[in-house]
Image: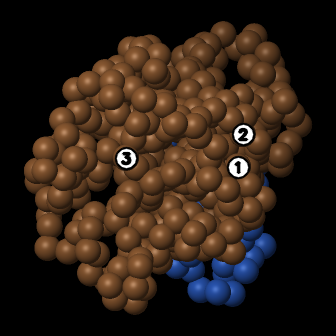
Chain colours: A blue, B brown
Amino acid sequence: MIEICVGTSCHLLGSQDLFHVVEALPIHRQAKIDLRGVACLQCCRKGPSVRIDGLVLTEMTPDRLLGVINDNLVLR
Amino acid sequence: MPRLHAEVAVAQLSKTGEELCGDKVEVSRAGDTTTVVISDGLGSGVKANILATLTTKIASSLLKHGIPLEEVVNTIAQTLPVCRERKIAYSTLHIIKLRADGEASVVEYDSPASFLLRNGHVVPFPTHEKVVAGKTVREGYLELQENDFIVAVSDGVIHAGIGGLLKLGWNWQGISSQLASNYSSDCNATEVAEGILNCCNGYYLGRPGDDSTVVAMKLRRSRKLVLFTGPPSDKSLDERVVKRFLQVSGKKVVSGGTTANIVGRITGKAVKVDLSYHDPEVPPTARIEGLDLVTEGVLTLTAAIDRLNNCRRLNDASFQDGATLLARLLLEADQIDILAGTAVNPAHQNPNFPSQINIKNQVLNKLCAKLELIGKQVAVEWF
């Protein structure tokens, strides 16, 4: 499960771009991901924040997220 | 007895070829009372508009200052000049005062009789004649019921189609039949005003022979909305504020991610972000069971202030962003209570962020001012 924070700071710091990363994946890979938004992960100073399978990651970038997704999907 | 509200709608047409409408309408609200003043200036165009404007402004100002209706009528009747040749006033005067408890007063000077529309039946608003300052005035008082309408029209509507589609014009009976056949208690004031005016324009074949005005007032239940935005500065107040928020009967809106989380925590309900609609400017909305809308905070509130004026966006159902949804709910409400938390998010002090998010209080004050300007009753409580 990937939960991307959509709070004020994270939105301004680019959380929309993180959604686009997942939406741009091939369909068969998207099907393996449960993508959700979350109201606020309380890490506003270090946004955009993402929670992946319960683990909060901050200052996320599109490239880093893609890397994390690839690593996790390979391991499955 | 549920709280009632006077919903007012105005629809107007100018005489063909004239830029300005010679009819003027002033709507004002003070406390529990809504007052509508209508004036039809003699002739049409600029001169008529000036006459009508003077009449409505003078009457409105006097009423706003608490001058009793009788004295206002007296003052206007004494000051309204009369055309020596035609022996008619340079402008007519029509005043409708409606209180939230249903008490209605009507004064008609040289204007068509008001219509009372109740459960699909129309009667003239009951009035009696009186001579004030040498002029014959009709006045009346009535206790209205919930969902009653008072409809007032200017001469242009009465004479719609005259000499053309309708030999003698639409006349009072014709308008009355139209109201009775087409408008039930479920309709709103805008539907009635615009519907009658469209009909009037139709009878004129799209070229109105006179300035035409329709004012519809509906006495209906007041609509309340409570908006909870921003966490309280003292965390120990969270539960109290959430309880206050949930107890209000009416639409319930939360603006702010942290605020939504607080409500979720205290109620035990999940905050589910809705990713089905994307807007580049406004973050996604969320859902909490039992609430009407959950949005992000300051960015959405700022955008909602702009949306309040944007008829195109408000009327287009394809726009489902948080700010548009919030604006629609705010516009539907008559009374808006705002529970505003004053806790500051230090992360919002980022110099790279738009300046308004640092001063959310200012955004809220701007929103309140805008809502009051458009006739909403707003109350803010800071925590």
The quadrant where residue B245 appears: top right
Q: CA distance from mark 1 to mark 3?
A: 24 Å
The residue that disc 2 covers is: B144
Please tell me which residue lies in front, A17 or B26. Answer: B26
Q: Nearer the viewer, mark 1 or mark 3?
A: 3
Taking the image as shown, residue B49 lies to the left or right of residue B210, namely: left
Taking the image as shown, residue B256 lies to the left or right of residue B165, namely: right
Instruction: Give the percent coordinates (x, y) of residue B44.
Output: 17, 60
Taking the image as shown, residue B246 lies to the left or right of residue B128, namely: right
Q: Which mark is residue B110?
A: 3
Q: CA distance from mark 3 to mark 2?
A: 24 Å
The structure residue drawn at horizontal position 51% and vertical position 51%, both measured from the top left corner, is: B113
Q: Which mark is residue B148?
A: 1
Could one spot residue B312 in this view of the protein?
A: no
* Disc 1 and disc 2 in contact, CB within 8 angstroms: yes
The chain holding disc 2 is B
Q: CA distance from mark 1 to mark 2?
A: 6 Å
Instruction: Give the percent coordinates (x, y) of residue B73.
Output: 39, 26
The quadrant where residue B100 appears: top right
Taking the image as shown, residue B56 lies to the left or right of residue B377, namely: left
Classed neighbour count for the residue bearing mark 3: other residues with Cα under 10 Å, few (<14), some (14–19), many (≥20): many
The structure residue drawn at horizontal position 20% and vertical position 74%, both measured from the top left corner, is: B16
The chain holding disc 1 is B
Residue B127 vs B18, above or below: the answer is above
Amino acid type, callout 1: Asp
